[in-house]
Amino acid sequence: MRAAGGVSGPPVPSNGAGELLQLLRDGRPRTRAELAKLTGLARSTVGQRVDALLATGLLGPVGEAASTGGRPPVRFAFNPQARVVVGADIGATHGHVALTDLLGRPLCEIAEPITITDGPAPVLDWLATTIERLLTQSGRDRTDLVGIGIGLPGPVEHSTGRPMQPPIMPGWDRYDVPHHLATALQLDTGPSAGSATGPVPVLVDNDVNIMALGEHAAAHPHVQHLLFVKVATGIGAGIISGGRLHRGAVGAAGDLGHVAAPGHAQVLCRCGNTGCLEAVAGGPAITASLHAHGITAISNEDIVQLVRSGSIPTAHAVRQAGRTIGEVLATCVSLLNPSVIVIGGSLAGAGESLIAGVREVVYGRSLPLATSDLQIVPATTGRQAGVIGAATMVTQHVLTADRIDHAIATQSMSHAASATA
């Protein structure tokens, strides 16, 4: 199956309900009369579209407006509880999976240790089992599921959902992740009368992109130009430009970890090159510098705890990592001109030690025009950024106007065929 693309199947007529839903996705309740005034459509047309959306459950009544004489008119609003989405954040050593509503708000979640190097079959089978557990735990039926979003720790061709030469994922290169998961869960990937949005897509992207989507949706929805930087074992960036995620030609946009860090040409990176940013400023590089000073730290969590406990050498090492990252980000600021840079990932837990180093260099090195209104801030979504972003990726895909119209029309044609059979 394809992970993204146009609506499948033969053309079906548009009923316009999808466009009306886009207006109502802001959550504000409105009456039929208010919708007619906003859209300029006849009240009868609005009524037909409202009825079509009510039948899907995506729209629901939320009380009555004040009466101007006669029976009070009913208000309607988008119902984010109507269906559920799976958001999965798969890392090198962890798996975090959440069942969310249509606003990306987690309803229940499971996080467990996994090993990405075990290969795609064991990891994806674990994911399928975990999704079944979440559906059971939440009491939701499989027909309520509108899509699955997955973030993986490597480059992904988003149009097919296949990892592309991921450096820390042996056995995953070009593996058909959507097909494996759809088969394991017996998903209906064709037009389905049981779903309000048609097929159940499995969408895949790299982990930093979905974290960027999650942070953008949850904390900066009105920001048009945002750079999300994940600082952990590796370093990467998710680019929001013009309010949309920028993936690049083959899904490799934002691969900051393998940009050359100035002055470090002698440092060997796991990719085989030298001087890469993650080899100089990622978690393993920081732990190596601490060991040289007699300080034991094995994981990124150890580094964060040392900073929080007041270890001055660790705070200095983290701040220096921030400065090195800032040297690369200064170039990004000149190239992309973001209004917000969000620092996330496990090492962001070190707080101001990391961010102060980034700010020091970016504000000092970049031109004042580009930094006059630039904010460099910590992520607010924490460990939920990935699952929220993966769910957001799905809702952005399935709740478009054309997909809603296609699903409603297909459902109506199916019902009509059943009635005449």
Image: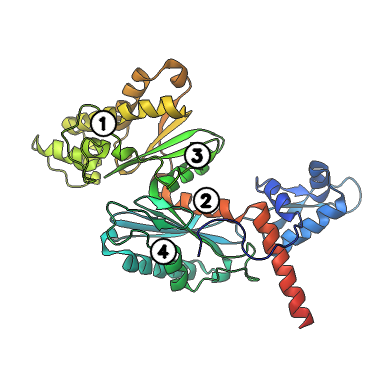
Furthest residue to the bottom?
Answer: 421
Q: If you read the primary sequence from the N terminus, does the residue marked by circle 2 or circle 4 appear first?
A: 4
Residue 272 sits in quarter: top left
| Image spot of residue 2 (x, y percent) | 51, 61
**SS at circle 3:** helix
**Which label number is shown at residue 8?**
none
How many angstroms separate mark 4 from mark 1 (CA)? 34 Å
| Image spot of residue 299 (x, y percent) | 21, 47
Furthest residue to the front?
Answer: 249
> Is the image coloured rainbow, by chain, by secondary structure, or in one colour?
rainbow
Query: Do the residues bearing badges 3 and 2 touch, measured as CB atoms within 8 Å?
Result: no
How many angstroms separate mark 3 from mark 2 (CA)? 13 Å
User: Which mark is nearer the camera, 2 or 1?
Assistant: 1
Q: If you read the primary sequence from the N terminus, does the residue marked by circle 4 or circle 1 appear first?
A: 4
Instruction: Find disc 4 in the rendering and name its residue.
Output: 176
Instruction: Find disc 3 in the rendering and name its residue.
Output: 219
From what the image shows, is residue 152 above or below residue 10? above
Instruction: Find disc 2 in the rendering and name its residue.
Output: 392
**Crowd class of label 1 (few under 14; some 14 to 19; many from 20; radius 10 Å):** many
Mark 3 belongs to which amino acid?
A: Ala
**SS at circle 2:** helix
Q: If you read the primary sequence from the N terminus, does the residue marked by circle 2 or circle 1 appear first?
A: 1
Q: Is residue 361 visible?
A: yes
